[in-house]
Amino acid sequence: MDQETIEQLKTLDASKRVIVVLFKWRYPFFTNLEAMKKPQDAALIGYFARQIQPKLTNEQLAHFDKVLWFDADYGDFARVYVNSDETKVPQIEEFVKELVEVVSPTKLHLLETEEFMIHPVAALRQKYGIPGPTNADLTRLRDKQWLKEHAATHSLPSAKFIVFDGSQKNSAVTSAEKIEAIIGSYPMFAKPIHGVGGGGGGRIDGRAQLDEWVAARENDEQTYLIEEYVEGREFWAVFALLQSGERRLLYLIHLPADQSMHASLSAGRPIAYIGLNVKDMKFEFPGIKNFLDDVITAFDPPHPHIFCIQGFQTKPAAHEYKLTELAYRINGARGTGISYNASGVSLETALLMCHLDPDYQAEPDSKHNCNIRHISLWYPKIEGILVNQTSLPATLTSEHEIRWYALPGEKMKSATSVADFICSVHLAHQQKETLMKEADYLRMNWTPEVQ
């Protein structure tokens, strides 16, 4: 840090009750930080990768008292989706080391908006005596094996599972037989214990495929969770955990009943993300609040923060749910991007404000039109070259926007995680039936032109 920055930070330390530091390594904001109103006695500092600077707006940056930039290295980026605990960003540690020499550590809140940054940021809290959860505190929310075992002790419904450790010296046949005995049927689903965003996960449809899967992972450094394959509607329910100790259910995202995120990603089919506010949620997911309350009571996530519960509704419009995973963070581009439209609360605003303002209640923005419904369609990359950025059909009556993440002429590989999309299509309409009909039409009939 240069001397000017040091003096600015000293001034903030002397004049502010709390100093929130937000780290961004890979991705920009996915909302416009709607209804962001930072208290006068709080400071907000950004430490962002220079590569995302062109994607940040002046409106977003205006909320920060100070923004500092670093040059990120994405050379091994794909690997963090398989094991997020391996994320290394040395520039951030060096910054925090300098920061605590200028600012009182007890005034700091360190935040991240990317799942693969949770582990390194929590480690920095512990190392430098900064308030907030450490990795030991977050194990129950992030470790998939611990989560499954803890859910079982609290009688929370979840898929049958077994843990596979490739470093163990069992034969492939012995391992496969043990897995079959526990799970009991096909298909199964396997994913790394510390994976994120679908990285390293996949479906197993029969014994021959299981034998092949196990044999390929003998002497593997990764540990995997293997579960029975759950059918139904996949959902993510999002909460704001407030400083008062209260929690506010903000919204729910779900996929169509005929769609699985992992299956669609693997097949290169568009994935539809549908946002529901709390009112609409009660009709389509009856009794879900009781299920969500039971999960939060069992796992007791630390306040303040954002908390997400992922699961399946196993029968249409029925009070039958299974827990899949937990997320002590905001959603990614798909869930966060639809947050304001679905609920009137920008999830990124809620993350910052629940740390900045002890009185923050995560109330919907008064400017939000709750009568407009929204769906976003995300198109995974497939093997080939993007020919052009195709227009959407002129017959659409929904408000619509298409955002491109690949350029014409770009040579693409098939998607391996939720980092790999060609484009996303965003639809809005007052009539739910019209919106669903047009989204289904696009899912079945429109696709980017790839050769």
Image (cartoon, rainbow, N blue to C red):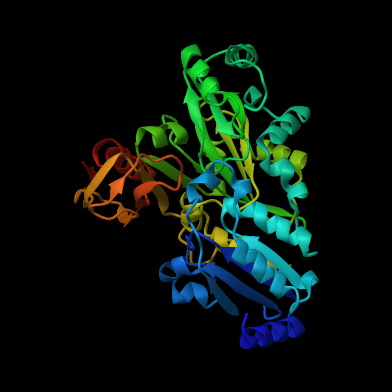
**Can you say whether 262 is above or below 381 in the image?**
above
Q: State left or right for residue 73 relative to residue 239.
A: left
Residue located at (65% from left, 17% from top): 170
Which of the 4 quarters of the picture holds residue 17?
A: bottom right
Query: x, y percentage for residue 77?
Result: 49, 51
Q: Nearer the viewer, residue 84 or 108?
A: 84
Callout count:
0
Q: Nearer the viewer, residue 318 or 269?
A: 269
Query: x, y percentage for residue 81?
Result: 53, 44
**Can you say whether 209 is above or below 376 in the image?**
above
* Residue 448 visible in image: no
Which of the 4 quarters of the picture holds residue 66?
A: bottom right
Query: x, y percentage for residue 441?
Result: 27, 39
Residue located at (48% from left, 69% from top): 50
Residue located at (75% from left, 53% from top): 134
Q: Nearer the viewer, residue 290 or 77?
A: 77
